[in-house]
Amino acid sequence: MQQSKDTAEQIGIEHTYYTRPVARLQGEFVRKSLHLLIALVPMLASVNLPATLALLAMGTFFYAFAETSRLQGRPIPVVSDITLIASRVRDRNGFVLGPITLGIGAMLSLILYPSPAATIAIYALAFGDGFASLVGTMVRGPRIPYLHGKTFSGSFACFAAVFIVTLRITSRPVDALVIATAATFLEAIPTGNFDNIILPFGVGMIATQLLL
């Protein structure tokens, strides 16, 4: 009985800490810093595509193993600690799916789309989605109705990031505008962690059609 009480108190303490604004911002920074690392994938793929796909697959499987172990009470040092810091409160007592969908989104982009469409898709995932969350957390502006907390500031950050990287890759302003608009729309859809798959899949498809 006492153990149950202590556990409940500990959960309450953790919930109070992780719902504080500073803790939420810290978690968002850690989460999106990891998110931005996916931007290294196109460079690695340009050197060796099969090895990059294998590395992404192994990393995804290892994370799945680590997260399963954490939920079974056998946390993996460092990996499980980072997962807890970076996870949202709503995900903390369950399987944190974000890194899985992130890896799948990057792998699908490399498999389905040619360069530079695959590169644009992965950069949209890394920079578009990444800056949308960071800016949306830091700049608490008006929220977009019916989109579960999405903010205009976050959507603008997504649009700007995708437009800049696409223009830099293609030097085609109209195509960059279309792709950035599509990325902003896809990022704003409240699909939870599955936006890590939907965003690069949709952006890669549109980029492929435009650039071919």
Image: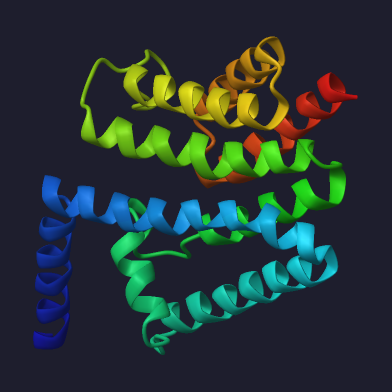
Which residue occupies 10% across, 80% down? 6
Q: Is residue 115 above or below residue 93?
A: above
**Residue 19 place in picture, x, y as percent:** 16, 50
Which residue occupies 84% across, 24% down? 211
Q: How many marks?
A: 0
Q: Is residue 161 above or below residue 22?
A: above
**Can see residue 53?**
yes
Judge from the rendering whether residue 171 lies leftward or rightward of residue 82; answer left or right: right
**Residue 132 place in picture, x, y as percent:** 41, 32
Q: Is residue 166 above or below residue 50?
A: above
Which residue, as the protein is rendered here, is positioned at the far top? Answer: 174
Q: Quadrant of the C terminus?
A: top right
Q: How is the image coloured?
A: rainbow
Query: Observer-nearest residue: 12 or 24?
Result: 24
**Can see residue 89?**
no
Which residue occupies 12% across, 64% down? 12
Figure quadrant of residue 123? top right
Q: Quadrant of the N terminus?
A: bottom left
Which residue, as the protein is rendered here, is positioned at the far right? Answer: 212
Judge from the rendering whether residue 41 lies leftward or rightward of residue 97; answer left or right: right
Which residue occupies 27% across, 55% down? 27
Judge from the rendering whether residue 52 lies leftward or rightward of residue 176; answer left or right: right
Figure quadrant of residue 175? top right
Query: Observer-nearest residue: 42 or 180?
Result: 42
**Residue 203 place in picture, x, y as percent:** 70, 30
Figure quadrant of residue 100? bottom right
**Residue 134 place in picture, x, y as percent:** 33, 39
Query: Observer-nearest residue: 110 or 192?
Result: 110
